Image: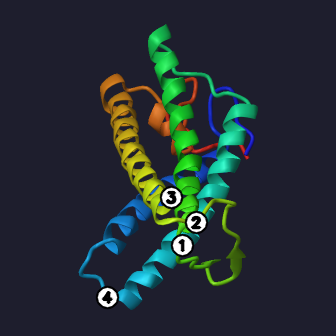
Amino acid sequence: MRDAADRYGRGTIILHWLIAVLILGLLVLGFVMTRPWIDPALQFSLYQWHKSFGMLTLLLAVVRLLHSLLGARVRPPTGLGHLERRMSKAMHLLLATLAVIVPLAGWAVASASPLEIPTFAFNLIDVPHLPLQKSDAGEAFWSTTHARLAYSILALVALHSTAALYHHYGRRDDVLLRMLGRAKTPAGKPSTECVP
């Protein structure tokens, strides 16, 4: 997952896109599974899948957050002003942090629920509940928090994607190409190489 000064490593790229797909999938699944017309048996199954993929996202997001805090930094593209660099850094840190906090809040929902429904991640691992007091009020609080944070991350993903497309089509720099493993060479042509 080693990054270079001008490009992301393969591990970083894979983690980025995998977490992005998981987050978007979880948002869709979260919306569908809460519809009142869903068959109860199907709804229970969807909740278990949502929790399973949420736990996977939490694990990968913790790895990604630690890597972004402790790993080498990829140099920002030339032409960015001081404020733009700070905003970009803040956006990336906020997204990485929310990718950890949103599944944690979901875990808290299951943990605070008086129903005490167990979480079996992918029907393989019995995930213990967090040490939270079980109550209807606690479950409602964490459900609301989880939903609001999920919609917040959706808004930030939309903003992040728009910025990446603006850089690619408006500024014509290599911001998007870097995360696709196609950073520009010194001659200005895209390269398919990325750091192992």
Depth order, front residue of 91/114? 114
Query: Badge 2, how many Cα within 10 Å: few under 14, some, many 20+?
Result: some
Calculate the distance from the C-alpha at mark 2 to the C-alpha at mark 3: 7 Å
| Front-most of residues 12 and 113 | 113
Look at the image and tell me whether residue 114 can be seen: yes
Q: Which of disc 4 and disc 1 is earlier in sequence?
A: 4
Q: Earlier in the sequence, mark 1 or mark 2?
A: 1
Q: Is residue 31 left or right of residue 5?
A: left
Q: What residue type is labelled 3?
A: Gly
User: The residue tagged with tag 3: helix, strand or loop?
Assistant: helix
Q: Which amino acid does label 2 sit on?
A: Lys
Name the side, left or right, on which 173 lies relative to 102: left
Element type at mark 1: loop
Q: Nearer the viewer, mark 1 or mark 4?
A: 1
Which residue is drawn at the image coordinates 52% and 65% (left, top)?
135
Give whichever of 76, 177 is nearer the camera. 76
User: 191 and 181: which one is in front?
Assistant: 181
The residue most toward the left is 37
**Badge 4 is on which residue?**
39
Q: What element carries label 2?
A: loop
Structural distance between the alpha carbons of marks 3 and 4: 26 Å
Q: Position of residue 104 (x, y in %)?
A: 59, 54
Q: Distance between the residues labelled 3 and 1?
A: 9 Å
Question: What is the C-alpha distance between the residues marked 1 and 2?
Answer: 5 Å
Q: Quadrant of residue 30?
A: bottom left
Identify residue for label 1.
114
- Are dots 2 and 3 in contact, CB under 8 Å? yes
Q: What whole-number distance in Å separates the C-alpha atoms at marks 2 and 4?
A: 26 Å
Task: Give the residue pinned by disc 2.
Answer: 134
Q: What residue type is labelled 1?
A: Pro
